[in-house]
Amino acid sequence: MTEGHLDNRRRKFWGWGFADTGISEADVHALGSMIHGKFGFPIQDLAPAPEIGEIELRSPRVSPPDSLAGICAADTWARAEHTLGKNLGDFARGLDRKFDNPPDFVAFPRTEQDVVSVLDWAHENDVAVVPYGGGSSVAQGIEPIVSDDYRGAITLDLRHLNQVLEIDHESRSALIQGGVLGPDMENQLRPHGLTMRFFLQAFEFSTLGGWVATRAAGHFASGLTQIDDSVQALRVVTPKGTVQTRRLPADGAGVSADRLFIGSEGALGVITQAWMRLQDRPTFRVGTSVPFTDFDKAVAATRALAQSGLTPANCRLLDPTESLLAGASDGTESVLVVAFESADHPMDTWMRRAAQICADHGGRVSAEALQGKSAPDAARTGAAGKWRDFFVRGPYYKEGYTRMGVLRETFETACTWSAFPELHARVVEATTKAARRECGDGVVACRFTHVYPDGPAPYYTVVAPAKRGAETHQWAAIKQAASEAVLAAGGTITHHHAVGRFHRPWYDQQRPDLFASALHAAKSAVDPGLVMNPGVLVDGK
Amino acid sequence: MTEGHLDNRRRKFWGWGFADTGISEADVHALGSMIHGKFGFPIQDLAPAPEIGEIELRSPRVSPPDSLAGICAADTWARAEHTLGKNLGDFARGLDRKFDNPPDFVAFPRTEQDVVSVLDWAHENDVAVVPYGGGSSVAQGIEPIVSDDYRGAITLDLRHLNQVLEIDHESRSALIQGGVLGPDMENQLRPHGLTMRFFLQAFEFSTLGGWVATRAAGHFASGLTQIDDSVQALRVVTPKGTVQTRRLPADGAGVSADRLFIGSEGALGVITQAWMRLQDRPTFRVGTSVPFTDFDKAVAATRALAQSGLTPANCRLLDPTESLLAGASDGTESVLVVAFESADHPMDTWMRRAAQICADHGGRVSAEALQGKSAPDAARTGAAGKWRDFFVRGPYYKEGYTRMGVLRETFETACTWSAFPELHARVVEATTKAARRECGDGVVACRFTHVYPDGPAPYYTVVAPAKRGAETHQWAAIKQAASEAVLAAGGTITHHHAVGRFHRPWYDQQRPDLFASALHAAKSAVDPGLVMNPGVLVDGK
């Protein structure tokens, strides 16, 4: 067998990032001071991060056959690295050295044929397979929890399927392997003047195949939000064989085959390649941020923008608490960050109209924005820039929060504009109440990550004092209250974090029963042994 | 039992439109003169349209139970009206008085419970059910051809489910019944200042449910092209029960339930209601038409427009023959019709940039367009206006062509920009050759109905001298040649005309086999008796 760390750079087995990167303890302390200063929460001494020597894993239940041993690893690091995701509960369990559900081994296929071989072996041997991209799931989508009816569970880490295989510049698309991480993909596209422009927060440690499998949403706030619309064709290896859809800009021939696999979360097969629609690299950019004293008016402005047809690249509304957390305001105002970009034409006309819409709704719009120009400090140093830095560093901070005894986690949804006011009120009330009950204190912040003509995608951040060792339980209770409120008020359990295992109870309420039957039947047709990521979307054995 | 013509206005049982409307014989003669003048094809005396008294139908194999008799009709008109679609083969068979596959009776549900009752009865009695909207299928999607393993086949005509039930103005959406015809829907939306702006050519005689079931594409040439993206939530009655999806602007919770039913062509169930995303009524409009002497350069201009991010409402490229047919040019030039519309802001900046792109590619752009203004004659009387009239009257002309002995039919596809040149060359060559072989002569015209950043949707029109009584055979042979060329060159068998029964051979080649298995399994879960539109997408018994 091989060892797990086949990259040039080993990834952490706990937390976020490479083993040799992360935020410094000084940065974590600064974060703690900020939290304490703003909310008065007690900050604890930093809990020591786990060392690999401290981790004990159960013995593997199965081993790879000789034919696959060369691409498989069962060392502690490899197995631990593939045990937990990136949710608060994952971080807390990591800090507690609790790695209860490791894969029995990890396969690192180097070719699509390797994927086929692993699935064949798993199907024949009743072993569950968890497809693994960058491991950034916050919904327990990659944690190998399976019933005893399986002989074991393995992880299929696709990191070596990391190439841009072909460029079709004329059709502005590329054939890309599923296991490529965001930065590696962009580095391969850059020489061709192309980009996917899909900069989600987990960009560094998530993959193309993972984005498609989980219906991830990128940084575009309107227009091309979710990955779904950027998929031109898919190649999916299932236990019954390989599915290759046709490269088409659009198709009207029956039910979309692509859409059956988009969002399938590894439960139907492994996305080994996809033809993806790309963008030209933008050359024209303009942006601003607009403070509002009244949140409801800011929401109305955002709705007007979303329905205007202007399709802003950025249209992120931060409520006062979120603005405070991001350092974008003193916590008394909402801030709407608006930006446009184009590779074809200046966006000043678009910006001017957007600024006017904001002004019409009571936003304090800069003179520059009203003229279609960026405010001098918009890009990097103003509220928009502060928000951007906060966004990019978020995943790194996350382990810091856990170590300092601050419970900080997020959840997100989408709903119609008409449903939003009540949803927001109920969610904030239920979540705050649960946080105070479980943690003694707590604040709930809201931003819109994406907006549509018919509704926003609100994203909530909860910050509360954590009780060391009880974080998982605390968060589960808060999440329960929040999810019930979301569903009761007409939202979805997730706009872009996927279902995984964590969201199953609410997903099962949300989806139509007959659709569940149809999906189970479709799964059985391509995965008759139910070995693909069992428990995710569809029950396993 | 009732009678079929429960509307105020009876619809034709053959051809297009209401029984009391249509184009005059004088109009048909003028059309014939035009065709003769332009292409030299012989024009025959107008074949007499069939009268209902001339139609003989096989005896019904099944009758409705007493509980359903009040909403069912089995008179000759009702059965004949629901036998044929609107393809050339349908029109030719109608002219030949050949109505070989009538439904045994037609059910006209007045409530969703009626739909449930009909499906329950059909499931229990092994009777096939063909859901029927406006009857505009050009792919034999509504012709009740089923095997002898069914006791019979009935049509479920949804015309009475024709109400806009609820408006959510804030979220710019509405709950609409599936059986509403285009004009009736727009009439109900207009008082609210809303519109779907989905003006496909079959607008008058096609329904919301039909659009969703067939993935129809509207008049928007870019952006919101296919209906798929306008569906917010669906309600579908299947033999196993009713599916209601959640109203959401976007959702990331697993595989999309909506997308399983969008494009299901009646094979999974009946779309009784949908929450649809709407538009504000546009108040700003600008448009122009741009002649090009070089078709390849016109294609390049269209591609640049499609990739510009400007999202023109109209972006229809007519090749020289299509321009000639439409009266938009003398047949020596290609014409690109470009238009923008908005309910929020003037579109002059958009038009100006689009005009510049056209000029950069060699188009003869008017001075007005370069200033972002409509040419004085753009809207109704210029090339764009001529094209519009031609488009709107197309379905009415179609029966005229058949009666005068002119074979005129269309087929359409979509492909990537890189695939287009070879696809176009192969399709034109194969189709022209087949037309000459079958008809002795023939011309093939092309336009782009829709354009995407990664490729166009080319739409081909074939005009040839028909041999009376042999049109169905002639067209089948031409279509065979065209379809083989389309598939070999990487196109889809249909961008927006659906699969039905006519496209099955090529659809079966195009779709991945494992997806076919998955779809069959999904169908079996909601329609275990396989009674829903058997033969469409999925084989019946």
Image (tube, coloured by chain):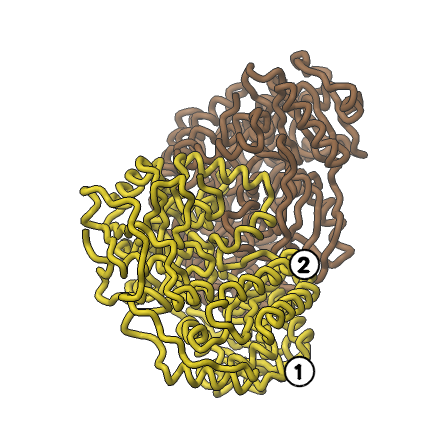
Chain colours: A brown, B yellow
Badge number at residue B293: 1
Residue A292 visible, this orientation: no
**Tag 1: amino acid:** Thr
**Tag 2: amino acid:** Ala
Task: Place residue A303 in its image quadrant.
Answer: bottom left
Which SS class for mark 2? loop
Query: Pointer 1 and pointer 2: residues touching (CB < 8 Å)?
Result: no
Which of the marked residues, 1 or 2, is nearer the chain's N terminus?
1
* Horizontal arrangement in the rendering, residue A269 relative to residue B500 (left or right): right
Residue at 56% across / 35% down in the picture?
Answer: A265
Give percent across and percent down for residue A233: 63, 49
Q: Nearer the viewer, mark 1 or mark 2?
A: 2
Badge number at residue B489: 2
Give percent across and percent down for residue B535: 46, 46
Give percent across and percent down for residue B529: 39, 36
Query: What separation in Å lies between label 1 and label 2 (alpha carbons)?
Result: 26 Å
* Horizontal arrangement in the rendering, residue B389 relative to residue B315 (left or right): left
Pinpoint the chain carrying mark 1: B
